[in-house]
Amino acid sequence: MSTSSTQTQSHHAPPGPASSATSTTAVLPAPSQPPATPSLTFSSSCSSAHSQVSAKRRLIDPAQSSQRRLVLYTPSSELLKCLGLFLCRRCYKLDLSPTQAIGWLRNIDNYLLIMGYQPVSFLSSGSVVFLYMLCRDLLSPEADSVEQLQVSLLTCYFITHCYTGNGNGYPETPFLVGSRAAFWDRCLSYISIMSFKMMQINSNRQIYSETLAELKAIGR
């Protein structure tokens, strides 16, 4: 009888601290979690879009890269031959061979190398394209003598060195034909005429590519 009374009392006794904590935990709502399906759908969409973009790049980039390599990376020796042909055709009145004018450029290049004004040859494809642009717009087809052509060509070559060269400074002496005062007057005049185009070809890849393609077409 005593045992039964004890069990009854124990059954109806108020809950202690531990029971209270358990009860409180049970009635709290479970932490909300973001639905899994939208997240998976978003990830799947991103993956699909990325795959489509990658597929398009695989289709487009190789051809564009190949074209750029063909246009932009042309050996300087090939471009110098094209430049020599251009000079002969432009100055049609003169008895000039394509190699003669290019020889003037190479002699100056060797002089600057030997004297330590430049660490490597200046006659890269980029410098030849720049020089061609100056010659195309500045050299007159009415040149009456080889010396007149040489004066203008070497002035353009000096400006090309000053604008695109790696050296800290270049001497005027190897470029000089005629008087020093006339040389500097010619430099200032040419720079005034070509300043915009010089900046443009240096900053605009499209302009450079078009000028390079134009020069290469002369040799075909």
Image (spheres, rainbow, N blue to C red):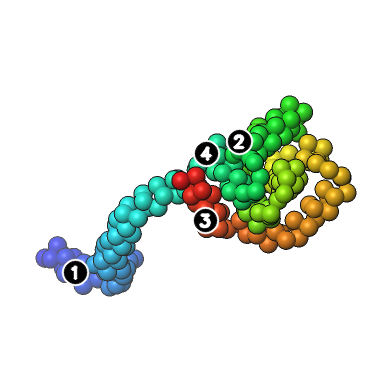
Measure the alpha-carbon separation of dots 1 and 4.
Answer: 105 Å
Kindly check if marks 3 and 1 are in contact, taking CB atoms under 8 A apart as contact.
no
Q: Is residue 133 above or below residue 97?
A: below
Image quarter of the N terminus: bottom left
* First reached walking from the N terminus: tag 4 or tag 3: 4
Give how far apart the Cα atoms at labels 2 and 3 are. Answer: 25 Å
Q: Which residue is mark 4?
A: 78
- Label 3: few (<14), some or many (≥20) within 10 Å? some
Q: Residue under circle 3?
A: 210
What residue is disc 2 on?
99
Q: Secondary structure at mark 2?
A: helix
The residue furthest top is 114
Judging by the rendered image, the residue that carries numbered circle 1 is 11
Of badges 4 and 3, nearer the viewer stands: 4
Which mark is first along the chain, 1 or 2? 1
**Frontmost residue, 180 versus 32:** 180
What residue appears at the point 88 percent right and 49 percent down from the top-left corner?
A: 181
Residue 131 horizontal/vertical position (percent):
64, 48
Element type at mark 1: helix
Give the image location of residue 135, x and y in percent.
65, 51
Q: Which numbered disc, 1 or 4, marks the residue closer to the eye?
A: 4
Q: Is residue 160 left or right of residue 174?
A: left
